[in-house]
Image: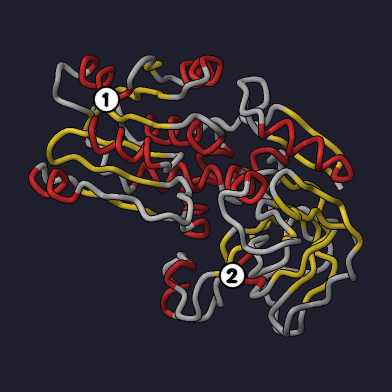
Amino acid sequence: MLHVMIEGPGQVRVAEAPEPTVPGPGGAVVSVDATAICGSDMHFYDGDIDLGMGIPVGHEFLGTVLEVGPEVKRFRVGDRVLTASVAGCGACDGCATGDPVRCVEGPKVFGSGMLPGGQATAVAVPAADFQLLRIPDGMDDEAALLLTDNLSTGWAGAQRADIPPGGTVVVLGLGAVGLCAVRSALAQGAARVLAVDPVAGRRDRAVDSGAEAVDGPTVEAVLEATGGRGADAVIDAVARDSTLDAALGCVRAGGTVSVIGVHDLEPYPLPALMTLFRSITLRMTTAPVHRTWKELVPLVQHGRLRTDGIFTHEFALADAAVAYAAVAERSAECMKVLLRP
């Protein structure tokens, strides 16, 4: 089989690897039909997070079941499935909530050194009955791939932002996750979504999704747009020091900051006194992907939540180095890349 390796900052190689085997009696092997590059993968590519040389990457993938263990009950060979980016044991009280972050054995992320990467021709998937979802009839690959991570993350970020009906929300960062957060916030009752990104074309994409573009210094622009009050909620889909500062600066007193971007490994100097006296709620999470499926699948199936316009490019898996370089430009033209083995 083939899989994509990040071997250092800006260094991508498609390498041969042994064929995967079923990871225990409850596991499965999935032949990958489509996979995608996530913003989190770019932390490895950019060198922000170094987990060692030669990481098989990718946590967004879908495909066809090739083999199942004897204890798998919900899936059989030939089923078309997608998988959640974060995995749990599937048998504990934490996993029973649909959130593998609460797994008593600890969550594991595909393509992070904990589990094999999904940017490959085949992947071993543990706890298949918990981890996999059969792709609904008529759902295209782009929508299904978004349900492995990005749409679930944007949806969970909006839920954890405590958006009041008719409220004003700021979304910082308008990559794939940020754009999903814009659409999710509107679907969850926000009257206004103020979209912030340094790339004008990405702001334009958010406007097409129903947001209002914010240009200029973020805090000042949001305060001006809200009559000096600040936003009811801020969703930070970047999580750099600068965006965390902006989020805390433009949320109203008593508001909520919901962080779904992946910060680097350096400590963040939280302005604790200001946060305390302004009674700000700060929440940070990876998405409980499994738990979001019950809500998101019917919304996507019936067109109540758009998934179009997020994927902009498609490459062969063999051209992963070119694909990563295109994503690294962070342009308006290249929002999200799909890879075909």
Q: Residue furthest left?
A: 277
When asked about the image quadrant of residue 50, the answer is bottom right
Label 1, residues with CA under 10 Å away: few <14, some 14-19, many ≥20: many
Q: Quick one: SS at disc 2?
A: helix
State the scheme by which the image is colored. Answer: secondary structure
The amino acid type of the residue labelled 2 equals Phe
Q: Is residue 164 left or right of residue 189?
A: left
Residue 149 position, x and y percent, is: 57, 49
Q: Which residue is mark 2?
A: 130
Residue 276 placed where, x, y %? 12, 49
Image quarter for residue 226?
Answer: top left
Left or right: 329, with 104 as reference point: right
- Residue at 66% over, 67% down: 113
Q: Quadrant of the N terminus?
A: bottom right
Q: Nearer the viewer, residue 154 or 139?
A: 154
x 56%, y 62%: residue: 86
User: Badge 2: how crowded within 10 Å, few (<14), some, or many (20+)?
Assistant: many
Task: Tell me how far mark 2 sits from mark 1, CA to CA.
Answer: 42 Å
Mark with earlier residue (2, 1): 2
Against 263, residue 117 (above or below) is below
* Residue behind mark 1: 219
**Mark 2, mark 1: which one is toward the viewer?**
1
- Secondary structure beneath dot 1 equals helix
Residue at 56% over, 16% down? 201
Q: Given the image, on which type of amino acid does mark 1 rest?
A: Val
Q: Is residue 69 above or below residue 327?
A: below
